Amino acid sequence: MNAIEILRQQFPEYAKDTKLNLQSVLTQSNLTPAQLWGTAAACAITAGHAGLREAIFSDAAEAGVAPEVLDDARAAASLMAMNNTFYRFRHQVGGEYEKMHPKLRMNRIARPAGEKLDFELYCLAVSAINGCEVCMRSHEKVVTDGGLSREDVVHAIRIASTMRAAACVLSMI
C-alpha cells in the first residue's frame, strides 16, 4: 500500500469527496509523471501539512520520478511563497506600487533543474493555492503558449485544490 493510500484510509466520512478526489487526481491524468508528481509535490509543500508532503514525495519516488523534479517542486513552492506575496500585494494595492521593481532574486524560474514548462506548471498550481492573480495569469500564459492544453491546466489546478483540501482534512484528524 502506498503512502497516499495509507493517508486516505484515515479520512473520516465527512471528507469522502476529498478522499476520492485525492485518488483520482493522482491516477487519472494526461499530464506526464513529472508534471503530475511535481505539481502534487509543490502543492503539498504549499498546503503545509508535513504528512501529506512526505506521502507525496514517497509515492513520487516510488513512481520513479527523477530527483530534479522534486527539487524543482521545492523551488517552485519556495519562490511562489515569495513572489505570490509580493505580486498579490502590488496588484491589490496598486497605484505607485505597480511601477516598483520587486528587487527579489528569482533566477531559478529561468533555469530550473528539469523541464522549464513543467516548472511553470508547478508555479501556476502553487499560485492558485496562494491566490495570486498576477502570477496565475503569467504562468498560465507560459504553459499554454508552451503547448499544454487548458485541460492540462485545469488538471493541475484540480491537484492544487485537492492537496489544499487534503491538508485541511489531515489537520483536523
Image (tube, helix red, strand yellow):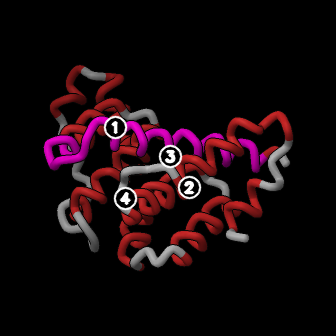
Q: CA distance from mark 2 to mark 4?
A: 14 Å
Q: 68 or 2: which is nearer to us?
A: 2
Is disc 2 placed on a helix, strand or loop? helix
Type of secondary structure dominating the magenta stretch: helix
Percent from the top left, x then y, of residue 167?
Answer: 67, 48
Which residue is under mark 4? 35
Q: Quadrant of residue 8?
A: bottom right
The magenta region covers 142-171
Q: Mark number for residue 44?
A: 2
Q: Are marks 1 and 2 in contact (CB under 8 Å)?
A: no
Residue in the image at 43% along x and 47% along y: 126
Q: Amino acid at mark 3?
A: Ile
Measure the C-alpha gap from mark 3 to mark 2: 9 Å
Name the amino acid type tagged 1: Glu
Left or right: where does residue 169 sit relative to residue 165? right
Q: Are marks 2 and 4 in contact (CB under 8 Å)?
A: no
Marks 1 and 3: in contact by CB < 8 Å? no
Q: Mark 2 vs mark 4: which is more N-terminal?
A: 4
Disc with the residue nearer the chain's start (1 vs 2): 2
* Magenta residue check for 152: yes
Labels 4, 1: front one: 1
Mark 2 or 4: in front is 4
Spatial CA span between label 4 and label 1: 13 Å
Residue type, label 2: Ala
Q: Does dot 1 land on a helix, a strand or a loop?
A: helix
Q: Which residue lies under the disc numbered 3?
A: 159
Residue bearing mark 1 = 151
